[in-house]
DNA sequence: GAGGCACGTTAACCCCCCGTTAACCCTATC
DNA sequence: GATAGGGTTAACGGGGGGTTAACGTGCCTC
């Protein structure tokens, strides 16, 4: 389920949007001005940020620029009544990913959100990383053409890592994707990672699962050598 | 420089587009039907695929679906005269990332291409200084192409310094970014800087981390000589 | 219903990395 | 030579991360 943030000062419009999105199965927080929106962004994880341009406190363009310079790379979709070419160009210059002119069709907004969130769960049938290949339709995972034996949780872990690849995934995110909100306070994740490593790495040349100290794990082909 | 593929059967339009894109500094191959487009995609790397829907041999929607099921996750931008809501929804259902209705402004096409490319392949967020490169997405740091081994705190220090570069950062600011309000009253920062120096400078030609006496540290390629 | 199997969970253990600390060293400055 | 700012080194202790085994549960088979 996608988690959205709507930053919009028109309360009527915001309410309508949030309600409609809920029907479509999308969670959506709402901030009514730029500063508050920024606060939300720092506070919580969102898959997509829906951003009006005309906002009190901090306008949408500045907000977008700011989070980009902060290194926050979340997908941003600008929603605005400004339909001039120059407005759009400015939006993209500020670092937005998409630009939708009001009034727009709600269903178009929804599909664009999904496209931005890269949640192609329904679309992508095959995930790969190096010589590792995961086939979602027949639920098989291959390495160098050999079938891997994966337990259900190992499978889910690997899928999560593959979808994120080459991005690293935090321990937190992995735990949430496995157990949702009730994360066990044991070392369960460690054991699952261990099992997954055994299944994916054992017998093959280079390891694909790497740990990122103090953060989590990455799936990627081994790259450069350390000096010395 | 971006590398695009345009799949479009209207040869006049295609020519115009390719020429305009060249002026804007974007390379663009052209395929005039779906099968040929598919062939190009398999053959070569593209940052973004511009896709018409009405195509001979293999229509755009099917083509898009097919590459998605093949696991090819390249950004696709559909360019079409079909402006009905249902057409757009179908496009996104087929797995496109963006949808632009003809006629469109060429400059909008260009900025959308950049936005798409940045998100997909360029989702990789990098910070660099000279031959030092920090990859924030997969959390690796390279110098002269060699992987650096950094502890979590070394990583945070380096990130802070890179973000500020070429400006100097005060000791105070560094300590706050590491420990927030409860800064230890020992020489911990000194040791961390020392370790970071060892990791970043050792074995390489010129040092990158310089101390600013009485203030803090800078990350800079060439040492700035202070006049006496 | 008994046994076997696969799987998730938990605890226990170990190792070594890493953060902290304190000490010492060097060098400039007065 | 006293002092202060900065650099270097080593010891220690905690904890992050890896590994293993035991246990329980559900499911399948016989």
Image (tube, coloured by chain):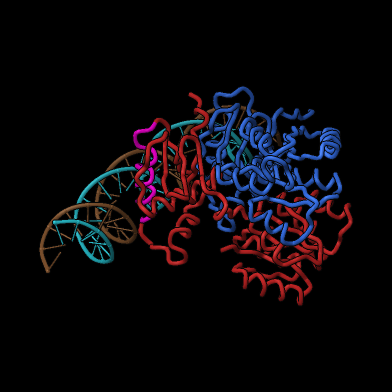
Chain colours: A red, B blue, C brown, D cyan
Q: Quadrant of residue B83?
A: bottom right
Q: Is residue C25 above or below residue A14?
A: above
Q: Quadrant of residue B120?
A: top right
B158 left or right of A179 in image: right
Q: Is residue A226 above or below residue A5?
A: above
A14 left or right of B155 in image: right
Q: Quadrant of residue A42?
A: bottom right
Q: Is residue A200 above or below residue A89?
A: above
Main structural element of the magenta stretch: helix, strand or loop? helix
* Rendered location of residue B157, percent (x, y): 59, 43
Residue A59 visible, this angle: no
**Magenta region, residue range:** A188-204
Residue drawn at point x = 52 percent, y = 31 percent: A223
* Rendered location of residue A221, percent (x, y): 50, 35
Q: Is residue A198 magenta?
A: yes
Residue B205 visible, this angle: yes
* Rendered location of residue A203, percent (x, y): 34, 33
Residue drawn at point x = 67 percent, y = 60 percent: A111
């Amino acid at each position: 389920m996608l988690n959205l943030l709507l930053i919009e000062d028109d309360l009527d419009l915001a309410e309508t949007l949030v309600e409609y999105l809920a029907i479509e199965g999308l969670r959506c927080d709402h901030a009514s001005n730029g500063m508050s929106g920024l606060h939300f962004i720092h506070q919580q994880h969102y898959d997509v940020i829906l951003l009006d341009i005309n906002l009190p406190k901090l306008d949408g363009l500045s907000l977008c620029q700011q989070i980009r310079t902060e290194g926050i790379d979340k997908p941003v979709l600008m929603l605005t009544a400004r339909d001039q070419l120059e407005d759009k160009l400015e939006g993209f210059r500020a670092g937005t990913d998409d630009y939708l002119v009001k009034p727009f069709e709600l269903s178009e907004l929804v599909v664009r959100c999904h496209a931005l969130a890269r949640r192609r769960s329904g679309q992508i049938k095959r995930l790969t990383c190096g010589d590792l290949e995961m086939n979602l339709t027949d639920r098989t995972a291959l390495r160098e053409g050999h079938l891997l034996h994966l337990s259900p949780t190992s499978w889910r872990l690997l899928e999560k890592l593959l979808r994120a690849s080459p991005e690293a995934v935090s321990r937190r995110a992995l735990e949430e994707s496995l157990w949702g909100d009730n994360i066990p306070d044991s070392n369960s994740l460690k054991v699952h990672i261990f099992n997954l490593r055994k299944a994916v790495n054992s017998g093959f040349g280079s390891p694909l699962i790497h740990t990122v100290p103090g953060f989590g794990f990455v799936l990627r082909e081994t790259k450069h050598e350390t000096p010395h």
